[in-house]
């Protein structure tokens, strides 16, 4: 294998693929990136056995071939080279060592056999649809914060993506919950998504695909089966195993009898929560909200730090005191981009629904705290 490639193009691709590779690996081959050079294209692949990223980048190929090289070391080398240079990569005849040259710099990296590199993306996935990159970004951003991190309830450690129906219209719905809060976001069902299996996309896959589509092209192709999901766009393909479990019946968590409605300016509300919670206890982050007609009072106290209160005007006519975890409340209110935020409450012990007045596609549920 022998090739020459633009440093910036190689670095961009290595940035994408090396992020999957765990820093500490008991299996040496999983620390490496698979490199295949042929027909004017260098293909880079990395995997942790649950997730695989493959990216293709144009290169000047003198001699076709393939090898695997240490992913993080190669990334660090290319990152530290000066801008605007070309990088030459050459594999020795035995296939055991790769030489990386640029200007006066030369590095020799130990390689492992290509045959040892595992592949998880070979299977065909029967269901598929396309989705605008902006819609996929919104779907992830509006729900990812509520994913659980508890290993005991592993089936909550991701986003539940499924076909649903809302007022007679079929929708693609994403739901996440950690037992304390729930986030639900939906959009019109894309063509081809009819009959798709309901799947739980793992936390790591959610984080990786969100980074990859930050500057993505207009459309993402999604294909999936009962146990794998694949995202394809530009010159990138990411394949991930799915969480093997049953997502709970989240509809039962969404209250239907809440009758107290309060509307606030989300930007004012978010800043007030942030200020008052400065004083709140570090563990529970408890924040008390007292409603009295058109006035809301936010308060927090801590034995060590003291206390804080702030008053603000709201639209509503309810009398109620309720406590929330301030961080969880901020996670939700920061998602609301419109001019109005609606809280639908029942009492101090029941879950509260929070919505954007101008965007019915998102719904959030937050469990109260005793304060």
Image (spheres, helix red, strand yellow):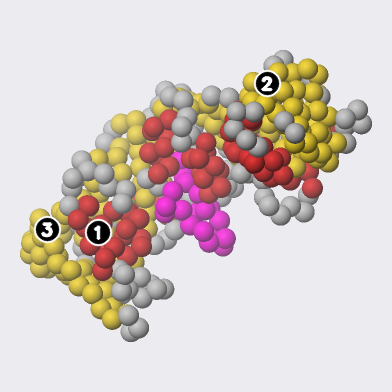
User: Dot 2 surroundings within 10 Å: few (below 14), some, or many (20 or more)?
Assistant: many
Circle on res. 59: 2
Report which residue position mark 1 lands on.
Answer: 271
First in sequence, mark 3 or 2: give its number: 2
Observer-nearest of 167 and 217: 217
- Discs 1/3, front: 1
Residue at 30 percent of width and 37 percent of height? 166
Q: Quadrant of the N terminus?
A: top right
x and y percent of residue 353 in the render? Answer: 26, 55
Q: Secondary structure at mark 3?
A: strand
x and y percent of residue 338 in the render? Answer: 22, 43
x and y percent of residue 294 in the render? Answer: 8, 62
Q: Secondary structure at mark 1?
A: helix
Residue furthest out toward the top: 39
The correct choice, above or below, for 179 with respect to 236 in the image is below
Report which residue position mark 3 lands on.
Answer: 314
The correct choice, above or below, for 358 with respect to 334 in the image is above
Queried whether the magenta region covers residue 150, the answer comes back as: yes
Residue at 55 percent of width and 27 percent of height? 232
Residue 75 seen in this snapshot: no
Observer-nearest of 262 and 304: 304
Please give left or right for residue 305 compared with residue 299 in the image: right
Observer-nearest of 8 and 300: 8
Q: Are marks 3 and 2 in contact (CB under 8 Å)?
A: no
Residue at 72 percent of width and 23 percent of height? 4
The correct choice, above or below, for 291 with respect to 354 in the image is below
- Discs 1/2, front: 2
């Amino acid at each position: 294998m022998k090739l020459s490639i633009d440093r910036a193009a190689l670095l961009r691709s290595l940035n994408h693929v090396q992020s999957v590779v765990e820093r500490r690996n008991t299996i040496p081959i999983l620390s490496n990136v698979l490199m295949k050079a042929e027909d004017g294209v260098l293909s880079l692949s990395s995997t942790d056995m649950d997730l695989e990223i493959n990216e293709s980048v144009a290169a000047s190929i003198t001699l076709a071939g393939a090898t695997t090289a240490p992913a993080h070391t190669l990334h660090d080398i290319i990152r530290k080279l000066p801008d605007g240079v070309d990088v030459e990569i050459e594999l020795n005849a035995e296939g055991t060592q790769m030489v990386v040259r640029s200007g006066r710099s030369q590095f020799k990296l130990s390689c492992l056999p290509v045959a040892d590199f595992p592949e998880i993306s070979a299977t065909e996935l029967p269901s598929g649809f396309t989705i605008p990159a902006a819609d996929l970004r919104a779907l992830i951003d509006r729900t990812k914060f509520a994913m659980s991190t508890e290993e005991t309830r592993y089936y909550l450690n991701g986003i539940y993506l499924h076909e649903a129906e809302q007022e007679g219209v079929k929708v693609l719905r994403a739901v996440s919950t950690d037992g304390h809060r729930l986030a639900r976001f939906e959009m019109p069902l894309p063509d081809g998504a009819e009959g798709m299996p309901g799947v739980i996309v793992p936390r790591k896959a959610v984080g990786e695909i969100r980074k990859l589509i930050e500057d993505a092209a207009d459309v993402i192709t999604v294909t999936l089966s009962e146990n794998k999901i694949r995202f394809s766009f530009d010159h990138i393909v990411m394949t991930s195993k799915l969480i093997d479990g049953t997502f709970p019946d989240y509809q039962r968590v969404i209250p239907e009898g809440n009758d107290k409605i309060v509307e606030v300016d989300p930007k004012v509300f978010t800043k007030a929560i942030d200020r008052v919670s400065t004083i709140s206890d570090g563990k529970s982050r408890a924040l008390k909200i007292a409603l009295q007609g058109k006035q809301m009072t936010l308060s927090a106290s801590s034995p060590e730090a003291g206390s804080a209160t702030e008053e603000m005007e709201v639209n509503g006519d309810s009398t109620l005191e309720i406590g929330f975890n301030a961080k969880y409340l901020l996670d939700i209110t920061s998602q609301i981009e419109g001019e109005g935020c609606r809280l639908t409450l029942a009492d101090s012990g029941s879950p509260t629904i929070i919505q954007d007045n101008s965007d019915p596609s998102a719904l959030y549920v937050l469990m109260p705290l005793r304060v």
